[in-house]
Each structure stands twice: as C-alpha cells, then as structure tokens.
Image: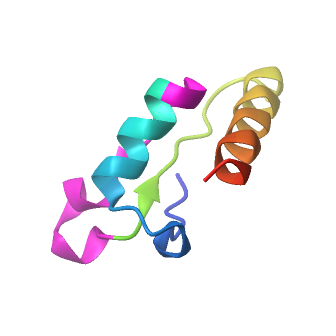
Amino acid sequence: YVFPSIKNTGLSSEEFAKRLLFEAKVAVVPGTAFGKSGQGHVRLAYATSMENLELAVKRMQEFLSNL
C-alpha cells in the first residue's frame, strides 16, 4: 500500500476518494478510515497487474489535471 498526501488538491480525503471513483473509475480508501490523522491522505493498493496499474495511473493523472 501507499498513503500519499492529497492536501494540495484542497479536497477532503472523503471527497477526493468519492470523486476519483465516480469521475476516473479508480478506487482508493480515504485516509480518515484509519483515524483523524489520515485526513489529507488516501490509501492506494497496488496488488494488481502492471496493465491495471498503468491504466489507473493514467486515469489519476487526468483526474488531477482537471481539478
């Protein structure tokens, strides 16, 4: 897993996760699922194929460029 900061997006962990899922079709877990200090972070799992990872990264890049 990775637990990157998304603070520079201006979105809460919950809003970021929800929008990423509905707008980019990429699922992450809001950092707040792991406690208050998780705000401003999301958890990403990368236990999948390289093809799926590349697709997810492409979708996340597009999502972030449109914020």
Placement of 16 over or under 6, stated as above or below:
above
Residue 67: image location, x then y, percent: 60, 53
Placement of 52 over or under 32, stated as above or below:
above
Describe residue 54's horizontal placement relative to residue 44 as left or right.
right
Residue 27: image location, x then y, percent: 47, 32
Residue 31: image location, x then y, percent: 32, 59
| Outermost residue to the left | 36
**Residue at the image point whose x is 55% and y is 23% from the top:** 25
Colour mapping used in the image = rainbow
**Residue at the image point whose x is 17% and y is 72% from the top:** 36
Describe residue 51's horizontal placement relative to residue 67 as left or right.
right
**Residue at the image point whose x is 71% and y is 33% from the top:** 59
Describe residue 32's horizontal placement relative to residue 8 as left or right.
left
Q: Which residues are magenta?
A: 23-39
Placement of 65 over or under 56, stated as above or below:
below
Residue 64: image location, x then y, percent: 66, 51
**Residue at the image point whose x is 53% and y is 66% from the top:** 9
